[in-house]
Image: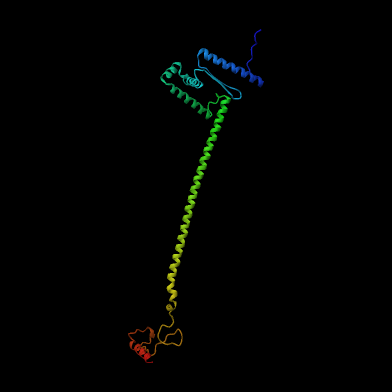
């Protein structure tokens, strides 16, 4: 009897699934090696387990990196047709082709980081993209905090300098006010000094303005021997020209006495 047809579906038992994966993986790697050696072709095999463990194989005469570059180059030019692709490959060096493939890979990665073209990504690729974004956000926040702390430090230094300048200005203003106050007090002392020293000399009675004797304070009597030819005016309003002789006689009489 022949072996029955095996139904291909997910194995529910975890242990059986792990055993089957180990056996089939070994067989797959063996088949890839056989076809690469027998047919002398470039073969690359990449396998990730359900837990994210990597298994890969590349032909002995080449490398995984070169096969992937060739694959990216093929994807890059597949829209131009086979003939056009060969023409471009002939006119471009290997370094140019490698650079173009690298640019295309970076563009695709950039679109994925922007949240575009996520439908073609597997669960593992999405998890890797999420981890990459989280790492980028942590780096961005760290750089932001560093710049903020640096800016705060510079502002505090400026604040300290301004406070020192303000203190110097306040001290200068205080010294200037003190100097002006002292000068003002000195000038007032100089102005008031002669008045206080000569107060007795400066005092002049204002009531008795004549040289005659008067028994009543505040009254003015004509000197002895003074004659007034004009009775309409008081004696002290008459000028010396009209009574010159009377004044001379009064002075002579006082000297004789």
Please tell me which residue lies in front, 134 or 118.
Answer: 134
Which residue corresponds to the image point at 49% horizontal and 25% vertical from the top-left?
105
Name the residue furthest top: 1
Please tell me which residue lies in front, 254 or 184.
Answer: 184
Examine the rendered structure and indicate whether residue 163 appears above or below residue 123.
below
Image quadrant holding the C terminus, namely bottom left
Residue 130 sits in which quadrant?
top right
Please tell me which residue lies in front, 113 or 20.
Answer: 20
Which residue corresponds to the image point at 50% horizontal and 42% vertical from the top-left?
150
**Residue 234 % position (x, y):** 39, 85
Which residue corresponds to the image point at 52% horizontal and 39% vertical from the top-left?
144
Image quadrant holding the N terminus, namely top right
Name the residue furthest front: 60
Examine the rendered structure and indicate whether residue 93 appears above or below residue 246.
above
Q: How is the image coloured?
A: rainbow
**Residue 6 % position (x, y):** 64, 13
**Residue 166 % position (x, y):** 48, 53
Examine the rendered structure and indicate whether residue 6 appears above or below residue 211.
above
**Residue 195 % position (x, y):** 43, 74
Total of numbered circles in the picture?
Answer: 0
**Does residue 181 appear left or right of residue 127 in this picture?**
left
């Amino acid at each position: 009897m022949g072996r029955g047809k095996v139904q291909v579906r997910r194995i529910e038992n975890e242990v059986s699934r792990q055993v089957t994966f180990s056996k089939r993986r070994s067989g797959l790697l063996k088949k890839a090696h056989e076809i690469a050696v027998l047919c002398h072709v470039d073969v690359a095999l990449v396998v990730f387990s359900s837990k994210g463990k990597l298994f890969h194989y590349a032909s002995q005469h080449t490398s995984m990196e070169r096969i992937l570059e060739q694959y990216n180059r093929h994807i890059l030019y597949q829209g131009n047709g086979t003939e056009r692709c060969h023409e471009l490959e002939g006119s471009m060096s290997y370094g140019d082709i490698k650079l173009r493939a690298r640019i295309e890979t970076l563009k695709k990665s950039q679109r994925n980081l922007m949240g575009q073209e996520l439908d073609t990504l597997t669960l593992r690729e999405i998890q890797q993209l999420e981890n990459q974004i989280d790492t980028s956000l942590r780096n961005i926040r760290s750089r932001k905090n560093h710049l903020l702390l640096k800016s705060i430090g510079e502002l505090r230094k400026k604040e300290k300098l301004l406070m020192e300048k303000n203190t110097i200005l306040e001290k200068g203003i205080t010294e200037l006010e003190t100097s002006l106050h002292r000068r003002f007090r000195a000038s007032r002392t100089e102005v008031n000094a002669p008045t206080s020293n000569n107060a007795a000399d400066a005092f002049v009675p204002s009531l008795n303005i004549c040289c005659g004797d008067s028994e009543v304070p505040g009254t003015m009597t004509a000197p002895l021997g003074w004659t007034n030819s004009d009775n309409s005016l008081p004696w002290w309003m008459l000028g010396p020209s009209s009574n010159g002789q009377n004044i001379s006689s009064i002075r002579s009489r006082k000297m004789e006495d």
